[in-house]
């Protein structure tokens, strides 16, 4: 919902990665199967990374890179880089991924740009 768009941002602690965090291969397999299904329908899967607060992004950099590499190894890749969807804390309401109105607007603008670019190809 958008009720929080009129509320002031709340403070939150950036997420930290667990030392044993690994890429979940069952998720990669699911995305690979979904891509095959989409292509069978004569469509194109456009995968965009999630938006993330910059300090959390820095804390998760290794797993973000590993996910991107695993996707690429399986002939699946983000259409845009995860770095493009890294925003400063001022764009988040109360967690590292829960955007406020300004964050929603910025992410929407980036998605529109990325989709326009994808359509041109």
Image (cartoon, rainbow, N blue to C red):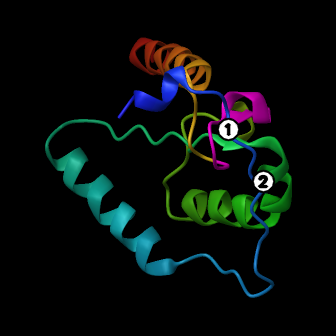
Given this view, does label 2 or label 1 mark the residue nearer the observer?
Answer: 2
Considering only order in the chain, which callout, 1 or 2, is on the residue closer to the N terminus?
2
Along the line of sight, which residue is nearer the eye, 103 or 22? 103
Is 22 placed left or right of 61 in the picture? left
Secondary-structure class at tag 1: loop
Is residue 88 one of those drawn in magenta? yes
Whether residue 76 is situated above or below residue 106 in the rendered picture: below
Quadrant of residue 88 in the image? top right
What residue occupies the far front of the structure in this picture? Answer: 7
Q: Residues within 10 Å of mark 2 (few under 14, many from 20)?
A: many
Image quadrant where one finds the C terminus: top left
What residue occupies the far left of the structure in this picture? Answer: 41
Q: Which residue is mark 2?
A: 56
- CA gap between label 2 and label 1 equals 16 Å
> Residue 83 location in percent, x, y?
75, 38
Query: Total marks drawn?
Result: 2
Image quadrant where one finds the N terminus: top left
Q: Which residues are magenta?
A: 85-96
Whether residue 60 is situated above or below residue 93 in the rendered picture: below
Q: Which residue is mark 1?
A: 81
Whether residue 51 is situated above or below residue 70 in the rendered picture: above
Secondary-structure class at tag 2: helix
> Residue 119 location in percent, x, y?
39, 16
Q: Residue at x 42, y 79 (%)?
A: 26
Q: Residue at x 65, y 56 (%)?
A: 68
Quadrant of residue 63 in the image? bottom right
Is 20 placed left or right of 48 in the picture? right
Q: Residue at x 56, y 27 (%)?
A: 7
Q: Residue at x 41, y 37 (%)?
A: 46
> Residue 112 location in percent, x, y?
47, 15
Query: Label 1 near label 2: C-beta < 8 Å?
Result: no
């Amino acid at each position: 919902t958008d009720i929080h768009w009129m509320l002031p941002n709340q403070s939150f602690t950036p997420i930290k990665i667990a030392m044993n965090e690994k890429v979940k291969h069952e998720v990669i397999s699911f995305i690979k199967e979904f891509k095959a299904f989409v292509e069978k329908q004569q469509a194109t899967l456009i995968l965009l990374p999630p938006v993330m607060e910059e300090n959390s992004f820095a804390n998760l950099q290794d797993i973000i890179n590993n996910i991107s590499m695993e996707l690429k190894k399986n002939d699946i890749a983000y259409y845009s880089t995860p770095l493009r969807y890294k925003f400063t804390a001022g764009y988040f309401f109360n967690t590292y991924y829960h955007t406020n109105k300004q964050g929603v607007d910025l992410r929407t603008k980036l998605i529109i740009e990325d989709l326009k670019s994808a359509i041109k190809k």
